[in-house]
Amino acid sequence: MNKTKKKTVRQLAFEILLKIEQNQAYSNLLIHQELQKSGMDERDKGLLTNLVYGTVQRKNTLDFYIDPFLKKELKKKDNWIRVLLRMSVFQFLYMDRVPDHAIINESVTIAKMKGHSGIGGLVNGVLRSIQREGVRSTESIEDETKRLALHFSTPEWMIEKWSSQYGAETAALMAESNLSPAPVTARVNVLKCSRDEAIAALEAEGITAVKGELSEDSIMAEKGFLPGSSAYKDGLLTIQDESSMLVARALAPEPGEQILDACAAPGGKTTHLAEQMNNQGDITALDLHPHKIKLIKEQAERLGLHNIHAEALDARKAREKYSEEYFDRILADVPCSGYGVIRKKPDMKWTKSESDAARLSSIQKEIVASLVPLLKDGGVFVYSTCTIDKEENEEMASWILKEFSDLQYDPTFKDKMPETVQAYIADNESQLQILPHYFNSDGFFIAAFRKTKKQTAGGETDA
Ligand SMILES: C[S@@+](CC[C@H](N)C(=O)[O-])C[C@H]1O[C@@H](n2cnc3c(N)ncnc32)[C@H](O)[C@@H]1O
C-alpha cells in the first residue's frame, strides 16, 4: 500500500510560490499544470489559485506588514520562510473563511517539514504577534508614489511611469485592478456552434457560463473549469481574454484572402482569424521560437481549422521570404512589456524592469518596418500589444504613420469595434487603448492602418 501522504492545498500552494520566487517561474503556468492534474475538487482548485495569485500579487504589501515582526533580517537561504509568512499573512488579511488558528497551525507544520523545529517556533511567533497586534497602515506614508506602490503592491517605478503617462489617479486604478482575480473567458468557435449552444453544452457538463459583454463571440465562466471541459476538448472554445478578441475584428479578414500573422504563437488570434475566414484563404502564422509553432498547430487541429500555415521565422526577416505586396492583411501582435495582463501573470510585477519598454519598442519598430512592404495596396495593417505603456502603443502608432507615408489610419476601424468600447477610441478614430479597469478585461492596445499609395499629379501611384 502506498503510504505517501497526500499534500494539502496549502503545501502545494507553498511549493508553487517557492518555484516562482526562486526560479522566476510563471505563476499562471504552474497553477494551470497543477489544476490539470486530477483529484482536486472545485473548492480546492479555487483555494490554490487564490493562495498563489493573491500572495504573489500582494508581495510587497505583505513584506511591508511582515518586516516589523522579524527580529533580524532573514538570510538568503532562508527566503522560503518569508514566502511561507507571506502566504500565511495573505490568508489572515484577505481570506475570510479560514480561522487564524488553522492558518497558523498549518504554516507551522509546513515550516517544521521544511526546516528544523526552531523555524516552526519562529513562524509561530511572528504569526501570533501579527494576529495579536495587527499590521501597520500604508495611509500614513507621505510620498504618494511610495504610498500607492505599497498600498497596491506594485513596484515604485511602475507607479511612477504610469502616473507620468496617465496621472496618479489612473495609475492607482490600474494598480488596484491588477489585484483582483481575472474572469475566465473563452471565444466560441463560430464554425462549430453559436454562443447559446456553447453555453448549453457547458451546462450539460455542470459548468455555468454567460455571454461576455465586450466581444460578440465571448463567454465568461461563472462556475467550473473551462479548459478542462469536453466543450474545450471538442474545439468549441478557445480560452482568450475579451480585449484580445477585438484584434481579429480590427483586422476583419475575408474568406479567401492572404493573411500574415507575424507574431502568432500560441495562436489565439491566428485561430480567431481562421474562424472568421470560414476556413478559406491562407493564414501564414510566424513566430520566432520554433517550439511555439507546435502550439499553433495543436490549437488549429483541436478547433478543426485547415487554412493556417505555421512556421518559425523572425518577423524581422519576413521580407527575405515573402514578396512585396503579397498579403491582403497583416497583423503585428508584437512582443511587448505585457503590463496589461498583470492580473493573470502577477509575478511580472517583480521580474520586469523599467528599461523593458525602450528595448521592446526598438524590436517592435524593426518588426513593423519589415512587414509594411509585404502589404498590398489597399490592405489593412493592425498593430497590437497587451500593454498599457504609451512608448509601445500611442508613440509607436505615431511613429508608424510618420515612417511609412503609404500608411494612413484605417477609417473603418471605429465601425468594426463594439459599442461598449467606442468611448475609448482615440480622436483619430483608428486606435483603442483599453485599460484593465475599464471592462475587467486585459489592458490592450490596437491601432489599425490602411495602405494607400500616394497619387501623383498624373494620377500614377507613387509609394
Ligand atoms: C504577444 S505574443 C503573440 C500572441 C499571439 N498573437 C496570440 O494571440 O496568441 C508575441 C509573440 O511574438 C513572438 N516573437 C517575439 N519576437 C519575434 C520576432 N522577431 N519574430 C516573430 N515572432 C516574435 C513571441 O515568441 C510571442 O509568441
Image (cartoon, rainbow, N blue to C red):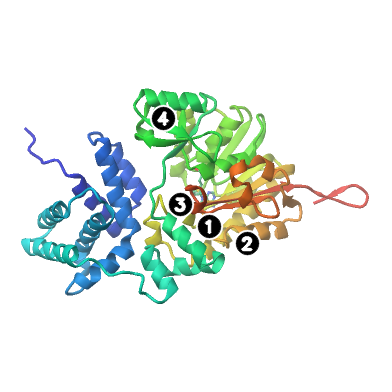
Residue shown at 46% from the left, 63% from the top: 172
- Please report whichever mark, 2 or 1, sits nearer to the chain's N-terminal start: 1
Q: Which class describes the residues within 10 Å of circle 3: few (<14), some (14-19), or many (20+)? A: many
Residue 125 in view in this figure:
yes
Q: Nearer the viewer, residue 404 or 419?
A: 419
- Please report whichever mark, 3 or 2, sits nearer to the chain's N-terminal start: 3
Residue 304 in view in this figure:
no
Secondary element at tag 4: helix
- Please report whichever mark, 1 or 3, sits nearer to the chain's N-terminal start: 3
- Please report whichever mark, 1 or 4, sits nearer to the chain's N-terminal start: 4
Disc 3/disc 4 C-alpha distance (Å): 22 Å
Q: Quadrant of residue 416?
A: top right
Q: Which class describes the residues within 10 Å of circle 2: few (<14), some (14-19), or many (20+)? A: few
Can you identify the residue that label 2 sits on? 395
Residue shown at 61% from the left, 47% from the top: 318
Q: Is residue 197 left or right of residue 65?
A: right
Disc 1/disc 4 C-alpha distance (Å): 30 Å
- Please report whichever mark, 4 or 2, sits nearer to the chain's N-terminal start: 4
* Residue 193 position in % (x across, y down): 51, 24
Residue that sits furthest to the bottom in the current view: 142
Can you identify the residue that label 1 sits on? 388
Secondary element at tag 2: helix
* Residue 241 position in % (x across, y down): 48, 43
* Residue 395 position in % (x across, y down): 62, 61
Can you identify the residue that label 4 sits on? 232
Disc 4/disc 2 C-alpha distance (Å): 38 Å
Q: Which class describes the residues within 10 Å of circle 4: few (<14), some (14-19), or many (20+)? A: many
Secondary element at tag 1: loop
Can you identify the residue that label 3 sits on? 341
Residue shown at 62% from the left, 32% from the top: 282
